[in-house]
């Protein structure tokens, strides 16, 4: 099997996990139509580019996205910050990518809770750990279609990168957001 991992960071542990299942390439730049057809599965995690519908439709299988929010809440960027700012449910979601931004059908989700001593930085790291473990645990069931995707329910929330306040202190206690 051939995998393409899309993300700003080259998540070494995730690349190692996928390399035990087949060949893996990593990309942080925009995808092209020529590239997409080479891969059996594409996994997006912290990828900063919107994948156009025509490329989504060219993929051999649905593109999997790992998002550190409890969808449909906090679609878009900086979901961890917005979950505290807007007091929305906190958690992680693994879903298929569709033509919208973080609107695709959900494969698996997990709610998370945080202690009153957490910071934005520590809560972000906790969410990353939870979603990565959830991905490893669910991977075989996802690619064998044992987990059926479910549509997102409700309006939820969405935030653009431009909405994020400047000069956020990521070490600030989550209760003071």
Image (cartoon, rainbow, N blue to C red):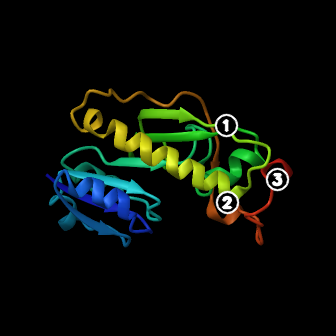
What's the CA distance linking mark 3 and mark 1?
Answer: 16 Å
Q: Which of the marked residues, 2 or 3, is nearer the chain's N terminus?
A: 2
> Which residue sits furthest right?
176
Q: Is residue 39 left or right of residue 117?
A: left
What's the CA distance linking mark 1 and mark 2?
Answer: 15 Å
Q: Which residue is mark 2?
A: 121
Q: Which residue is mark 1?
A: 113
Q: Which of the marked residues, 3 or 1, is nearer the chain's N terminus?
A: 1
Do tag 3 and tag 1 residues touch (Cβ < 8 Å)? no
Q: Position of residue 25 (x, y in %)?
A: 24, 66
Q: Is residue 76 above or below residue 92?
A: below
Residue 61 visible: yes
Number of other residues with Cα within 10 Å of mark 1, as a class: few under 14, some 14 to 19, many 20 or more? few
Q: SS class of the residue under badge 3? A: loop
Q: Position of residue 93 (x, y in %)?
A: 49, 40
What's the CA distance linking mark 2 and mark 3?
Answer: 12 Å
Front disc: 3 or 1: 1
Q: Which residue is mark 3?
A: 177
Residue at (29% x, 53% y) in the render = 17
Q: Is residue 161 left or right of residue 100?
A: right
Residue 100 visible: no
Do tag 2 and tag 3 residues touch (Cβ < 8 Å)? no
Q: Position of residue 72 (x, y in %)?
A: 57, 37
Residue at (33% x, 26% y) in the render = 148
Residue at (35% x, 43% y) in the render = 136
Q: Which of the marked residues, 1 or 2, is nearer the chain's N terminus?
A: 1
Q: Position of residue 158 (x, y in %)?
A: 62, 48
Residue at (66% x, 51% y) in the render = 123
**Foreground pick, 25 / 152:** 25
Front disc: 2 or 3: 2
């Amino acid at each position: 099997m051939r995998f393409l991992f899309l993300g700003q960071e080259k998540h070494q542990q995730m690349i190692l996990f996928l390399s035990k299942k087949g060949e893996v390439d990593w990309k942080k730049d925009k995808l092209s139509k020529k590239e997409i057809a080479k891969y059996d599965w594409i996994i997006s995690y912290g990828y900063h580019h919107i994948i156009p519908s025509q490329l989504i439709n060219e993929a051999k299988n649905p593109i999997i996205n790992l998002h550190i929010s409890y969808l449909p809440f906090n679609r878009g960027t900086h979901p961890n910050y917005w979950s505290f700012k807007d007091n929305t449910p906190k958690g992680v979601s693994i879903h298929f990518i569709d033509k919208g931004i973080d609107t695709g059908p959900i494969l698996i989700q997990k709610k998370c809770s945080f202690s009153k001593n957490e910071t934005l930085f520590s809560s972000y790291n906790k969410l990353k750990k939870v979603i990565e473990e959830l991905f490893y645990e669910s991977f075989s069931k996802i690619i064998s279609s044992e987990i059926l995707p479910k549509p997102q329910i409700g309006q939820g929330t969405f935030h653009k990168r431009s909405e994020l306040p400047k000069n956020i202190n990521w070490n600030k206690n989550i209760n003071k957001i």
